[in-house]
Image (cartoon, rainbow, N blue to C red):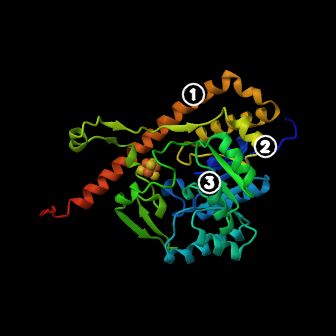
Amino acid sequence: MTNIKKPALLAPAGSEEMAVLAFEAGADMVYAGPRGWSRRTRAFEVDDSTIEKIADYAAANGKILKLAFNTLPSSDEIPAGIESISRYYGMGLRHFIMTDPGFVRQIKNRFPDTVITASVGCSVMNIREFNFYRAAGFDVMVAPSEMPVGELEELKQQFEGEIEVLIHANRDYTYLGRCTMSSYFRFRHEIDEKGKDNFFGSPNRGGLCYRVCKSSWNSPCLQSAGCKPADLGNVCYLSFEEIPEYIRIGIDCLKIQGREYSPKLVEKLVKFYRQLVDECAENPDTVKNPQWKERLIEMEAQRDFERNKRTGALLEECRDDSRRIFANLEPLELKL
Ligand code: SF4
């Protein structure tokens, strides 16, 4: 498989340190979220001066910084979004991750040379949706997580744009981007100095998800229906055996999620996938070597530890907020 086109490796940048470690470990691109716009808590988004530093580092080293503008903006927020993207465009950035087709059309009209990825929040599932988003101005589609290679190959043959695949992500109980559960836990919001309305508890509207699905599911109602308590867990999706196939069918980009991880864990993940992609491009059979699985198991344990700690803190924050809000409400009396 010499001279074969290798997919780009895209890594998270929850901070400047993480971005630099990821680039040095072999990432071709990193993605970061400007404050309020990227479906994550502010702690893992970055301010403008950090964006400028990462952008400068990327430009000096032949790498790419993608910025995530993938919350769903209200009409009132669009001018602030356009102003922000114009500022980043002025810094030399051309790659953006977005969700809203109307917003994208406005950006493409102003800046035709931008490269827009349809966020995982778009949940594009089939060739018709791929073509719909392409016509709206998106250039790169993120394929649904865990899509079988045969289906991906068909999409790749039919689609006249680029395809990105998640190789390390969190396993959701629903399609990524189609969860509305957080909408019930939007307790507060605040409009920041740039006009962005941040709804805490709603990734779609610029806050963070409280991960309520990861809470243990048990109630007298479920018990009376004969259901056992359920725990959806905090499981991640790590693919490695499919990498030679992704290379063969011409997937354009492989993405590692994890802006909330420690920079050292991201560095390890990037090193692992860099080596794996490079070796598989030379010899697809290398993936059968048991060393890959052994290294992955070790990283998975560290990932589970970090993710569980964060999820516990989010669930606690959600409980605190709900106690505070509901403590002041009069109980409802239902008259049937
Ligand atoms: S509540 Fe669960 S499924 Fe829904 S967005 Fe959050 S983590 Fe994903």
Q: Secondary structure at mark 2?
A: loop
Left or right: 139, with 232 as reference point: right
Q: Which residue of the protein is positioned furthest toward the top in this rendering?
A: 290
Q: Is residue 282 above or below residue 107?
A: above
Q: Amino acid at mark 3?
A: Asn
- Label 1 with label 2: CB-CB less than 8 Å: no
Q: Which numbered marker is on residue 247?
A: none
Q: Give the quarter of the figure containing the C terminus.
A: bottom left
Estimate the x, y position of residue 183 in percent, counting from the top left: 39, 60
- Label 3, label 2: how far apart the Cα atoms are: 24 Å
Question: Which percent across, then down, holds residue 130?
Answer: 65, 58
Ligand 1 is within 8 Å of the C-beta of the residue at disc 2: no
Residue at mark 1: 297
> Distance of mark 3 from mark 1, alpha carbons?
32 Å
Q: Which residue is mark 3?
A: 126
Residue 50 on image: x %, y %: 62, 59
Q: Is residue 29 visible?
A: no
Disc count in the image? 3
Q: Residue at x 20, y 63 (%)?
A: 328
- Residue at disc 3, CB closer than 8 Å to ligand 1: no
Question: Do tag 3 and tag 1 residues touch (Cβ < 8 Å)?
Answer: no
Q: Nearer the viewer, residue 288 or 88?
A: 288
Residue linked to disc 2? 6
Q: Which is in the foreground here, disc 1 or disc 2? A: 2
Q: Which callout, 3 or 2, points at the residue further toward the start of the chain? A: 2
User: Nearer the viewer's eye, disc 3 or disc 1?
Assistant: 3
Task: Out of 9 and 242, give the one closest to the viewer.
Answer: 242
Is residue 116 at all visible to an observer of this figure?
yes
Quadrant of the image occupied by residue 287:
top right
Q: Residues within 10 Å of mark 3 (few under 14, many from 20)?
A: some
